């Protein structure tokens, strides 16, 4: 499949900002599951942009606006071809304990993805769920499937229920949040079980797909950037699950950035100097190439 992606972020300040600085992790990577055909990042006001690759392999664009401005507009445009990637069946049939032992031999390569972070903390619930859904003798693939389904069933998708700073303990208590929160819950469980796992930020197809029974349903989280989980399995292969939509990742997903948690992979972050606040609006569209792409207005 080929997709046209448009991701627009518009900042409007209460009073003109004196200056601003930002980092964008918005460049999709070419991976076995996807090929980037084109990519363009537009910043208005127009300013020079420099780039580097961070610790997690993400392409980062840095920009600064050292002058007064009332608005900031960032448009990310890409065309990406996605590919079906078969799951590593042999690795997923291994017991969880055996998978842990094999991966333990490459500890220096996976260390970052076994560590807890301020956003991904161990909790009593993560220990309980690790024992329940990732028992040592259970096949790894079946365990990941059960964990994916359990998070989807137990947590309610509720935009506005959490913020970026909401502690994981609060998310466990209230059992509601958004894709970012569900990814953090899953990462906490997987790392508690000794399985290396990373946070993925990307896009999912905007339009609903018609099922054999004639019904059509849009994936949850399709009108914004989306978050899911990748787990490293023996053979040094990443497999991806999306607890928000209760499925393994397929051709309707495009990965953009990776990290230990949301803070490492956030698409756009920065700071500004000014006396007023700011209002941010975001619009994301990912449509199959050839489908009518409406103008992104925010």
Image: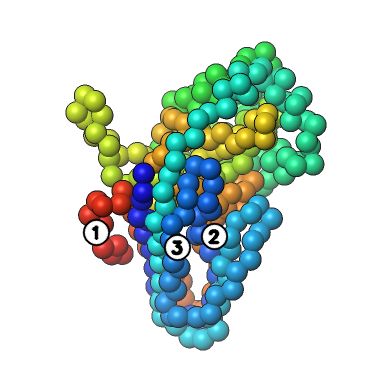
For the residues bearing labels 3 and 1, Cβ distance under 8 angstroms: no
Q: Residue at x 75, y 26 (%)?
A: 102
Report how far apart the C-alphas of labels 3 and 2 lie in the structure.
12 Å
Relative to residue 218, is residue 7 drawn left or right?
right
Cα separation, mark 2 vs mark 1, equals 24 Å
Q: Which mark is residue 96?
A: none
Earlier in the chain: of badge 2 and badge 1, it is: 2
Quadrant location of the N terminus in the rendered image: top left
**Residue 294: which disc?**
1
For label 2, the SS is loop
Q: Left or right: 149 with respect to 234?
A: left
Q: What secondary structure is marked by label 3? A: strand
Give me the residue at 49% from left, 35% from top: 85
Q: How many marks?
A: 3
Name the residue at 19% across, 28% down. 214
Q: What is the CA distance from the residue labelled 3 to the residue labelled 1?
A: 18 Å
Check disc 1 and report its element: helix, strand or loop.
loop
In the displayed structure, 30 sits above or below 66; it is above
Q: Nearer the viewer, mark 3 or mark 2?
A: 3
> Is disc 2 in contact with disc 1, using a CB cutoff of under 8 Å?
no
Task: Confirm or deny contact between disc 3 and disc 2 (CB under 8 A).
Answer: no
Query: Mark 2 sits on what residue?
Result: 25
Which residue is the extreme one toward the left? 214
Residue 39's tag is 3
The answer to whether one can see residue 279 in this image is no
Choose top left, top right, bottom left or bottom right for residue 44: bottom left
Q: Which of 147 and 119 is in front in this view?
A: 147
Density class for disc 3 (Cα within 10 Å; few <14, some 14-19, many ≥20) is some
Camera-side residue of 91 and 298: 91
Residue 190 horizontal/vertical position (percent): 63, 31
Q: Residues within 10 Å of mark 2 (few under 14, many from 20)?
A: many
């Amino acid at each position: 499949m080929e997709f046209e992606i448009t991701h627009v972020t518009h900042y409007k300040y209460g009073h003109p900002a004196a200056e601003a600085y930002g980092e964008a992790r918005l460049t999709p990577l070419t991976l076995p599951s996807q090929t980037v055909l084109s990519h363009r990042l537009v910043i208005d006001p127009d300013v020079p942009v420099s780039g580097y690759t961070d610790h997690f392999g993400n392409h980062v664009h840095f920009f600064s606006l050292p002058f007064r401005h009332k608005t900031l507009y960032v448009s990310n445009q890409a065309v990406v071809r996605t590919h079906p990637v078969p799951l590593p069946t042999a690795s997923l049939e291994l017991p969880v304990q055996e998978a842990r032992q094999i991966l333990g031999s490459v500890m220096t390569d996976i260390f970052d993805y076994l560590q807890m972070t301020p956003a991904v903390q161990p909790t009593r619930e993560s220990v309980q769920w690790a024992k329940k859904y990732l028992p040592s003798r259970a096949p790894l693939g079946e365990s990941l499937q059960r964990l994916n389904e359990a998070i989807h069933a137990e947590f309610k998708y509720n935009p506005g229920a959490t913020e970026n700073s909401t502690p994981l303990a609060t998310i466990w208590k209230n059992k509601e949040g958004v894709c970012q929160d569900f990814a953090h819950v899953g990462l906490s469980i997987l790392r508690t079980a000794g399985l290396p796992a990373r946070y993925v930020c990307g896009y999912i197809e905007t339009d609903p797909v018609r099922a054999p029974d004639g019904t059509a349903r849009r994936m949850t989280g399709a009108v914004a950037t989306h978050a899911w989980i990748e787990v490293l399995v023996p053979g040094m292969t990443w497999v991806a699950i999306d607890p928000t939509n209760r499925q393994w990742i397929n051709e309707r997903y495009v990965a953009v950035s990776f990290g230990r948690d949301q803070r490492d992979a956030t698409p756009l972050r920065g700071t500004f100097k000014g006396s007023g606040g700011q209002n941010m609006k975001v619009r994301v569209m990912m449509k199959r190439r050839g489908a009518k792409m409406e103008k992104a207005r925010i």
